[in-house]
Image: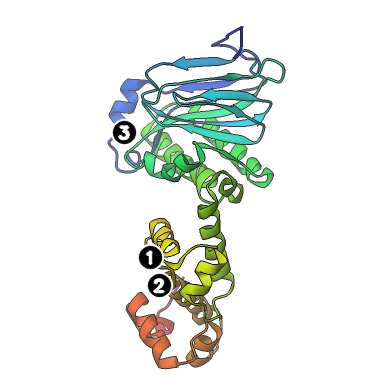
């Protein structure tokens, strides 16, 4: 832990704290209430940066370490924070965090609340609320932070809050849902589930069985099915059939292939079984779906 501590003022910093009375006025709006920013900042080369909150924060906190190093301390353990890593501190969680003395961090950070806020990082507990970010995603992350800064600096209005709430949802989506390197912070079982999902999506023409999928994940059929449904909400084969029908819809929309040809391309040998599966998921026949004008 740093011997010197500094709470305020870094050259080139950006810092916005939204007035609490303003947040009370706008936070019940249906487009703001699910997820909204309370504070946001950028601290470059933040030497001696240090925060200690014995009772935690009233908001959830996300910190992205673009450069340098630091640490975060939870009641159970202290974790080092490396360049290209982000971490989340759920609200009301006691914590300490700070910058490395020799290689101080540069961080983007945001405090946020909302009815849906906790759902974004619900799966991070397995990773200790810390995970890496790929270089490819870091550019988009910085762009979205800067987009929020540029709108908030022009004043606080309901329209601004609605817009920045949507950008925040996009930002958290990059961190938690399209960040492939995030899987590295998860337990091995979760990684293997993700890998089988990607395999399914890339091989919809194959007649994969539950036993084969479980073997790919090196898990028993029972345990694989449990973990898969916990993650997706569907049993594995049900999910695979949905991927097949999703691909079939794309082929119906973008090609002139006959329905039985499309059925074959997504792994259905029996066109009648394909039609029944399609109707069950889409609530109409493939022919009826093709007749709908789209776009």
Residues marked 2 and 3 touching at CB (< 8 Å): no
What residue is shown at x 63% (from left), y 18% (from top)? 46
* Disc 2 to disc 3, C-alpha distance: 39 Å
Taking the view exactly as shown, the residue that stands out farthest to the right is 102
What residue is shown at x 48% (from left), y 33% (from top)? 88
List the residue tagged with mark 3.
27
Which residue occupies the foreground of this view, 192 or 287? 192
Q: Could you tell which of marks 1 and 3 lies nearer the N-terminus?
A: 3
Q: Could you tell which of marks 2 and 3 lies nearer the N-terminus?
A: 3
The percent coordinates of residue 214 (x first, y second) are 50, 67
List the residue tagged with mark 2.
238
Q: Is residue 129 left or right of residue 21?
A: right
Question: Which quadrant holds residue 222?
Answer: bottom left
Which residue occupies the foreground of this view, 177 or 31? 177
Q: In this rendering, which labeled residue sits more in front, label 1 or label 3?
A: 1
List the residue tagged with mark 1.
234
């Amino acid at each position: 832990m740093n011997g010197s501590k500094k709470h305020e003022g870094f050259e080139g910093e950006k810092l916005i704290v939204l007035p609490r009375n303003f947040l009370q006025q706008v936070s019940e709006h249906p487009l703001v209430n699910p997820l909204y920013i309370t504070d946001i900042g950028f601290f470059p080369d933040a030497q001696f940066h240090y925060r200690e909150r014995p009772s935690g924060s009233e908001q959830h906190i996300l910190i992205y370490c673009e450069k340098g190093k630091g640490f975060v301390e939870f009641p159970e353990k202290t974790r080092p924070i490396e360049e290209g890593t982000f971490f989340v501190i759920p609200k009301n969680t006691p914590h300490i965090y700070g910058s490395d003395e020799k290689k101080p961090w540069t961080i983007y950070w945001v405090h946020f609340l909302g009815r849906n806020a906790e759902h974004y990082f619900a799966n991070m507990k397995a990773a200790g609320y810390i995970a890496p970010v790929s270089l490819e995603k870091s550019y988009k992350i910085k762009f979205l932070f800067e987009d929020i800064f540029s709108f908030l600096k022009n004043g606080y209005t309901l329209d601004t809050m609605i817009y920045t709430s949507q950008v925040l949802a996009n930002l958290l989506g990059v961190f938690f849902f399209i960040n492939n390197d995030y899987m590295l912070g998860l337990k091995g079982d979760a990684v293997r589930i993700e890998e089988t999902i990607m395999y399914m999506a890339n091989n919809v023409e194959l007649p994969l069985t539950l036993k084969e999928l479980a073997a790919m994940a090196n898990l028993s059929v029972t345990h694989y099915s449990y973990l898969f449904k916990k993650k997706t909400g569907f049993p594995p084969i049900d999910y695979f059939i949905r991927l097949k029908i999703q691909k079939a819809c794309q082929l119906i929309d973008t090609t002139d292939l006959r329905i039985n040809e499309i059925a074959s391309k997504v792994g259905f040998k029996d066109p009648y079984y394909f039609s029944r599966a399609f109707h069950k998921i889409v609530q109409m026949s493939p022919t009826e779906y093709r007749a709908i004008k789209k776009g």
